[in-house]
Amino acid sequence: MIKIKDISKAFGDKTVLDGISAEFDKGKTNLIIGSSGTGKSVLLKCIVGLINPDEGRVFYDLRNFTEADKEIKSEIRREIGMLFQGGALFDSKNVEENVMFPLDVLTKMPLDEKRDRANLCLKRVGLENSNKKAVSEISGGMKKRVGIARAIVNNPNYLFCDEPNSGLDPQTSILIDELIHEITHELDITTIVVTHDMNSVIGIGENIIFLYKGHKLWEGNHTEITHSGVEELDDFVFANKVMSQMRKQ
Amino acid sequence: MIFLGSLFVRRESFATYYKLVLEECIQIGINSALLFILVSTFIGAVTTVQTAFNMVSPLIPRFVISQVVREMTVLELAPTIMALIYAGKIGSSMAGGLGTMRITEQIDALEVMGINSSSYLVLPKIIASVLMYPLLVILAGVCALVGGYLVGTVAGILTPTEYVSGLRFSFNPTEISFALTKSFVFAFLIASISSFKGYFTKGGALEVGIATTEAVTTSVISILLADYLLANLLLR
């Protein structure tokens, strides 16, 4: 479980996050949603420690991450897997080496064992025949899958996904969403997904927080989101034509 | 200084660094050797021709030509001029590579995994640079002298015996130590400045280009300043 308490962050005069508190449960796909520029990615970066919040604290299973020293932070981070928006795969390594990388630097596993584990994860994300391909040879959707395989290879307790289906076609987006959702349940981990994709929200949002102009305006799940009664959230949820028509019906 | 200090905290295992340093050594050393051989051989050859062209007095023995080539090569051409080329080739590659890693979130990915990204990415580059550049300078020095020998003897500027005796005449071994000291300092400056510029790139592809240019420009200026300071400190 991850708990954030009163997280605030400003860049110069611009306040991006203002006193955000939330709990993200273990074994659930937790979503942070909101329009572009509402601070979703900044909040995610505050949670994983890539950005230091100006105020507030982040707890990983009651361990105070924000005020921990570098060694403790490093220990907690070794329990984290993260899928970045662009995949963030290492260009100098092939698919298999990318997935093996966390094992290379964080464990003392023998090479064969690392390779087996990497290939198991690649198989889990449906890429069993692409392990020797260069990163430049694979598509955007495959990069996301490799990113997921790399994120789960070291058996993380926490999985973070920053806009996992940005730049993907609708079908691949759904596959990626389902993969994240299944992995969360299989491994019983705490997953936080930042997204503004309504398919993801409806499909996998077991616990959703909605950010608006740096504030948390609403919290609930995918069945509650369509009748939240929050005007800003309704504007966000029913922005596209299909959802808008569904609302009218 | 803070950046350099950060390289030594939360380090990974020795085996990890060993592998990374080895990879960087190949990237820096082996992949630059051909360029160094080519440039230094021609510089040595041209220096011989131009020195001979300026030494028209019958009172000056011809072996002085190779003596001048030796002095120029050891003191300046091999360590300093090659450092400028090294900054252009290796410095830009380091800054560009790290800058691209920064804007594509690869550095963030390392941090999230609990790895000290600056130490993991930059320390091996600096170590490899300090190890390989002096070797490249020795290679460049030898090639320049060989280039001078080939052109000098083939073009009939001086005989092989005159060339070799010029190389050996009033040779001061301290000059080699001076050249190697310079090469260590230049290697450190180029690797650390270029890494710093690349590591702290912000923005997109345009900023990576700017960081790369800044890395080369700053490295070149610092090489020239360090060259002057070291000459003042060590050759008095």
Image: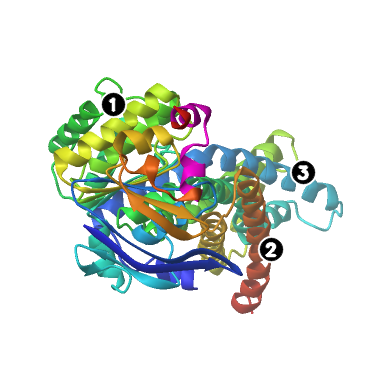
Task: Specify the segment rendered in magenta.
Answer: A232-246
Q: Secondary structure at mark 3?
A: helix
Q: What residue is at 84 percent from the left and 52 percent from the top?
A: B54
The image shows residue B136 at horizontal and vertical percentages of: 51, 49
Residue A238 part of the magenta-drawn span: yes
Q: Is residue B178 above or below residue A244?
A: below
Q: Amino acid at mark 1?
A: Asn
Q: Is residue B128 left or right of residue A59?
A: right
* Residues flagged by tags 2 and 1 on a common chain: no
Q: What residue is at 19 percent from the left and 47 percent from the top?
A: A189
Residue under label 1, please give it.
Answer: A131
**B139 or B15: which is nearer to us?**
B15
Residue under label 2, please give it.
Answer: B221
The image shows residue A230 at horizontal and vertical percentages of: 45, 51
Q: Amino acid at mark 3?
A: Val
Question: Residue lying farthest top?
Answer: A129
Is label 1 in contact with label 3 (beta carbons under 8 Å)?
Answer: no
Residues packed near mark 1 inside 10 Å, few (<14), some (14 to 19) or many (20 plus)? many
Give the CA separation, mark 2 to mark 3: 29 Å
Q: Is residue B10 left or right of residue B61?
A: left
Quarter of the rendering occupied by the C terminus of chain A = top left
**Is the magenta region chiefly helix, strand or loop?**
helix
Q: Is residue B163 above or below residue B8?
A: above
Quarter of the rendering occupied by the N terminus of chain A = bottom left
Chain letter of mark 2 equals B
Question: Residue lying farthest right?
Answer: B57
The image shows residue A11 at horizontal and vertical percentages of: 56, 66
Q: Secondary structure at mark 1?
A: loop
**B71 or B83: which is nearer to us?**
B83
Residue A88 seen in the current view: yes
Residue under label 3, please give it.
Answer: B49
